[in-house]
Amino acid sequence: MLLFFNQKQPRRIRVIENILTGRKTVSTLFWGMRYGILDQLGMFKSLDLNEDHDSLKQLLGLNLLKPTFKNQYLLTQTGLLEQNKIRANYYAPKSLNANFQYNVKRFRARFLLIVQIISEFSFHNVKYYPLQIDFKDAMMVKRWFHTYKHHQLIPKIKHLIESLLNQLPTQVAWQMASTFVGHDEAGQTYLQQSLALKKSVFEIKMMNFDLFCAMIHLIIKDNDPMMMGILNGLKRNLASDSAIKTFQLSEQESLDMVEKKRHIKMSTVQEHILEVAICTPKHKFPFHHFLNHQMMNRLASTYSGAIDDWDYRSLNGHSIDFFYFRLYQIFRSKL
Amino acid sequence: MNNYHVMLNHALKIHFHFDHFKLGQESVLNQLLNHRNVLAVLPTGAGKTLIYQLYGLVSHRPVLIVSPLLSLMQDQVQRLKYLGEKKVAAISSLIGFQEKEYDLNHLNQFNYIYISPEMFSKPKVMQKIMQINWGLVVIDEAHCISQWGPDFRPSYLNLGSILKKMNYPLTLLLTATASERLRKDIINKMNFDNFHPIKSMVYPINRPNIYLSAKLANDIQDKNRILKKLVTELKTPGIIYFSSRKKADQIAMMIQNDCHVKSAAYHSGLNDETRYKIQHQFMNNQIDVICATSAFGMGVDKNNIRYVIHYHLPGDLESYSQEIGRAGRDGKQSIAIILYCDGDEQIPYDLTINSLPNSDFIHAYYLNPKSVAGSNENWERLLKYYTKHRFSIQQLLNLFKCRKIERQKNLRLVLHYASTNGCRRRILLRYFNEQVPSHDYKCCDWNCNHIDLKRLGLFKNHKDRKSIYDFNWHQIINRLFYIK
């Protein structure tokens, strides 16, 4: 948990928890972006908050963190040293950005089932207990398997896995390999892997998540239609469908019209647009459509320095809505 | 009455590759094939699933199974699929909307449908179910119908009227545990009478190959010490039952570290993937000891479990006899041990108190159900049922008071069983009105200062398991995919 904190930027534990468990409010998304942890959104669906509050107490007790204000914490000098020590042996995720574009959890579930089915298929065994995954994904896997089962499926999937694992340090590769279930292989649980690798369950889960992200990147790079089929229907935008609808409409209509047509409050319209702005790469979001030159100039002349420290109240007298202030913060964050 | 002996044995051989039925299976099947409703009391491990599965196979008619435990239902569906029966589905709140819709719209294509009693009571589901001409309706864990049973479920009370609406299809009520009083109550609640008769078939619960023992500890530390000694010395595999998930996690870790056996926790707090892995590692003998809550075991078909230890007191002798019944299904010598120390009865006592709504809650609910919404879903569900059936507050208070007294009585019986200086088997079997065999050294720990594991043939057969990992991922991948 210490790794989520910074010596200069006070951080809220609630934001970190909400990002990791995938609770998406605009405020969470905004601060998640500011903390640079948005790519970890929804990585742990069931994070034990109580346990983490205990560990927070511990970190404070050891003087690794210090409270600033409103439940925000800063890393102390001792904390920084400790963080560096941890980082030296800590798994550094490299592929989490796949989480922006694909539903990694569902991909992982599909992939595990695919490995199991192909493993059993390679042993000509039809009598086994398949992993239980979501009905829709299980149906997709079934169809996919029947389409390709006579197309060199066994060596191809083996090759795909090996080409990923060959690039990894031995223990990391073992972690991924031992996650799989197959013929006479029950696989290892996160807890068992954590005991074997002498790492925390948290780190192991993050490692595993990152490796499945890496697998997505590899499939896209190889561009083999068979393997690309596993990704069918998993493409996603981090922003909600509803937010995207509002945003699309707002590109053609005034915000007042969007409010009427969508039958939602103006505050919701604005939240939707902010959500899309946060979740979209900068060059793909039309900031200038919402922030005209005049407004940009005014905001630019009012604010400089650390974005987190900007105070909306500094705009007093300029009659600029908080929505535009926040949108400008997002714009500047993505520079 | 026709006897289907030859046909049934032939079917048993062809479909299950067994030469003989287990006690009770054939007799119950014979009754069903003669169109007689049956209430069968069969001990855990007697092969209850096989009865209705085989009935479906020989009658070529669909079977509907009402089952109270959602996770168990899923396990049973998987098990039937594993055994080659693909046309099987479970309709419960555990499955997603799309799957449920699909199943309901294709009901006539399934041979076996599992359904939860709550789902069964829904009008839309009911309507679909009524359209099928069921060959057999099975009510599993039928003791849930009775308020005197250990796990009464109000939604089970609807089943009587549902069967009536279905015009009394052939029905099989199954339970592993039912005293005479319970059986009468079940039959009564299900509206069976002289016009719609049902035959009770009761088979003994006694398992002579399970040695019975209990150990009194001074405190928790002492209890853990005794447990560690037992786990170190006992032949594996084994199951240790807990009332709390947290404790199951802690002790699994303690055993793994201190006893050099492979252990893992298993409970509903783990996700599906982890539960799958633990269950299959246990089945493949890669794990020696499972530290579980009571959810584990039902649907687990492992014959060679050598011991069942209860770290916490069970709530009643019915569930105790069911849980220890998971040991020694292969007929070989096994052992069941309760560990307890003073004050342990508080846990099941608290569970009893907490499982029923208190007076304040009931009053608040009757005044305005919304005022307590979301504070305790189980209590709300219970009260929703009773208000629907027009119970007054006073009636409810009396009813819950009776149930609390009943459960406390059950708990006292467990304590009596655990603390007796006499023969434990005698206490257990007397409770179920069964004949008590004469005591011998394989019966229980009466007059024994220590359990002679060597004499029982239960002394450790496993070498210390030390976890050695070579992290050779190539080997794992090569084992996963067989390429000629």
Image (cartoon, rainbow, N blue to C red):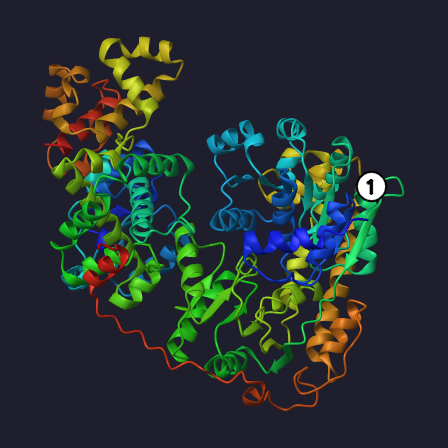
Q: Residue at x 63, y 43 (%)?
A: B56
- Residue B350 shows in the view: yes
- As drawn, is B287 to the left or to the right of A94? right
- Choose top left, top right, bottom left or bottom right for residue B284: bottom left
Quarter of the figure with the C terminus of chain A: top left
Instruction: Please name whichever residue, A113 or B48, is drawn nearer the observer in this view of the structure.
Output: B48
Q: Position of residue A38 (x, y in %)?
A: 23, 40
In the image, residue B62 sits, relative to residue A260, either above or below, namely below
Q: Position of residue A103 (x, y in %)?
A: 29, 37
Task: Name the residue at the right extreme.
Answer: B194
What's under tag 1, amino acid-wise?
A: Asn
Q: Residue at x 90, y 43 (%)?
A: B194
- As drawn, is B268 to the left or to the right of B149? left
Q: Residue at x 81, y 39 (%)?
A: B392
Instruction: Please name whichever residue, B406 or A35, is drawn nearer the observer in this view of the structure.
Output: B406
Q: Position of residue A86 (x, y in %)?
A: 19, 62
Q: Residues within 10 Å of mark 1 (few under 14, many from 20)?
A: some
Instruction: Please name whichever residue, B10 or B468, is drawn nearer the observer in this view of the structure.
Output: B10
- Check the residue under mark 1 and report the chain it is in: B
In the image, residue B324 sits, relative to residue B392, either above or below, namely below
In the image, residue A62 sits, relative to residue B272, either above or below, namely below
The residue that mark 1 highlights is: B191
In the image, residue A292 sits, relative to residue B137, either above or below, namely above
- Choose top left, top right, bottom left or bottom right for residue B93: top right
- Choose top left, top right, bottom left or bottom right for residue B432: bottom right
Quarter of the figure with the N terminus of chain A: bottom left
- Residue B364 shows in the view: no
Q: Position of residue B346 (x, y in %)?
A: 65, 67
Q: Secondary structure at mark 1?
A: loop
